[in-house]
Amino acid sequence: MDWHFLFLFVWLTGAAGILGIRSVQYQILKKKAVGSSVPCRDAGIKSMIRSICAEQSVKGKISVRLSREIKTPMLFGYYRPVIILPHRKYHEDEAEMILRHEIQHFKNRDLCYKFLIMFVCDLYWFNPILRFMKKAAYQDIECICDEKVVRELDLKGKKIYASTILETATRGKSEVVFGTHFSRGKRSVEVRIRNIFTRKNKWGYVFFAVLALAVIGGTCLWNVRENESSQTQDGSLAAGAADGEAEDQETGDQETPVFDVDSVEELELLRGFHLEDYYITNRTAGGNRFYIDSGSVLWGYGSNDYGQLGNGQRDELGVFYSEPIRIASDVVSVDMSMNGYFCIYLTSDGKLYGMGADIDHILGEDSDPEGSPEVMIGQETFPAVTSPVLIEENVAYARTGGKCIVYLKNDGSVWWQGRYEDISYSGIVVEQREEGLQTEESWRMRAVSPQKLLDNCIYVTTGGENGAAISVNGELYTWGWNIMGQCGTPVSDDAFVREPVKVLDNVQMVWSGRMCFNSPEQEIPEIWHYNILYRFTVFARLKDGTFMAAGEGAGDKEIRNLIGGGDLSSEVIYRYSDTFVPIQIE
């Protein structure tokens, strides 16, 4: 073995070892930053992203996620870059500056430059000078990004930008190898802030030196064997699904039910439970949209035929408010009846307010002053509450159904008011009702005053026909309409489960009807799509990540129903499961 071969062996072994370490570092960072994050559901931040991208002519979709594992904002990912923000409250100016900075990194393709610099330095690991060049180049990348961001800002804007750098610098100082970050280190921050206010254009020379070195290094030829086992996550999942299908064919097992959802990504949940992660900041239903901006202000627009916009009046059907109306400030969560009858919202001090059709006094006992307008829903008339009224205090979380509300108080108790109704869905039920074989009590579950259902709970939700709650021990309780076993209990002569019943353990999250938190629609759609709405199905996610469902489409039990009447009547068979079974989502 001559010394040339020995030198080459040591060089490539060292380079391979360092690149292997980098691969491990990447996986660790990916798990820490992305694996522990959840999609950002703040409508204000999403709107800000779209506005900045349009302003800077940025093509491609940039998603935003929140993580409790990182200390400073960062851009991560080479194939599909994502902005990851520390999970905390942001002022509007602060959020705008952070997003402008990370979007500029995306536009500059700085992740690729950092990767190239890192690769060259690791390849020539024996040259200590490259380490200093890499540090300087990383500094230049941040300064160039800062310069482009502040180019159109006035002095006040530059001060806000610099203050944001200082603020984030106090939260995290470690270098991010595979991503860009908003700030790091005392010296780095000092140089960047000086650069912001002096606008010196001396950056970038190191880039050419490093890139030239990369070209020179490219003259050294070596063979890299492809690792055929490395695939994208989507590919791995597809292969796993194919294997699962093959196994089903071999064993003859029944195929797992598949349900459509708005976004699989949104249903990724943090390991720890934090109720504020599930606040609703964008809700679109009926002919309305309500959203909370980054300043915690609630806005609404659309129809106002039930007084649901809370602007002090009720308008005739057909009147449409295209400009958002400011409704309230200091709001943390909002929800709306799926039919647009009423809206509720929760403020940071735990007060629950509502406006719109006051069905069964769900908006409070004092919400029906003399002379208030009225609205008709079906064959019934209700007061129209045209300005927000206080429903309850000490509330931690609240959701609406079609004609009901359910809320979780700070002491962990669950309260419900309103109604679930066995409406004209069932031709048999309607037929029996017309013949006088059913009383009102048998086809309606109703409460005209707040009813306490449970204690010691951490989460609650409701759809149009069913409610559900999760206890502190991870137990799932359900109640409401059960004609297709959607409560997870056997169908009985009574169409309703009128008292909460425990149906599952080790539950992380639950949905009734539609598997989403925020509405994905950023505008009121002209045509609604119902392929992701399952009125008669309750979904749950276990702590091990398994998705479960009970109700329509989840099993092979049958219910036969008559549709139409006379010569046009026909029988329809619905399949369901009255226990929770594993499902797939896509």
Image (cartoon, helix red, strand yellow):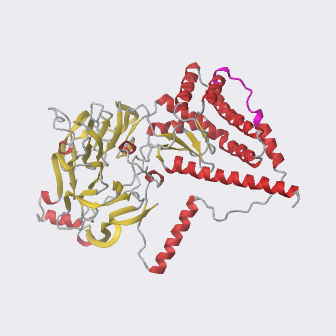
- Residue 120: x and y in percent read 75, 46
**Magenta-colored span:** 196-206
- Residue drawn at point x = 27 percent, y = 37 percent: 352
Q: Tell me which corner region of the image, top left, top right, bottom left or bottom right, holds residue 262.
A: bottom left
From what the image shows, is residue 461 above or below residue 566?
above
Image quadrant where one finds the N terminus: bottom right
Residue 32 drawn above or below residue 292:
below
Q: Would you identify the image quadrant in which residue 408 lies?
A: top left
- Residue located 39% across and 38% down the image: 291
- Residue 468 lies within the magenta run: no
Residue 13 place in picture, x, y as percent:
75, 56
> x and y percent of residue 101 in the render?
59, 34
Report the number of numbered marks: 0
- The foreground one among 432 and 142 is 142
Q: Is residue 251 above or below residue 405?
A: below
Q: Nearer the viewer, residue 29 or 8?
A: 8
Question: Horizontal placement of 295 versus 453: left or right?
Answer: right
Q: Quick one: 555 or 138, which is closer to the camera?
A: 138
- Res. 276 visible in picture: yes
> Which quadrant of the figure has residue 113?
top right
Residue 204 within the segment the image draws in magenta: yes
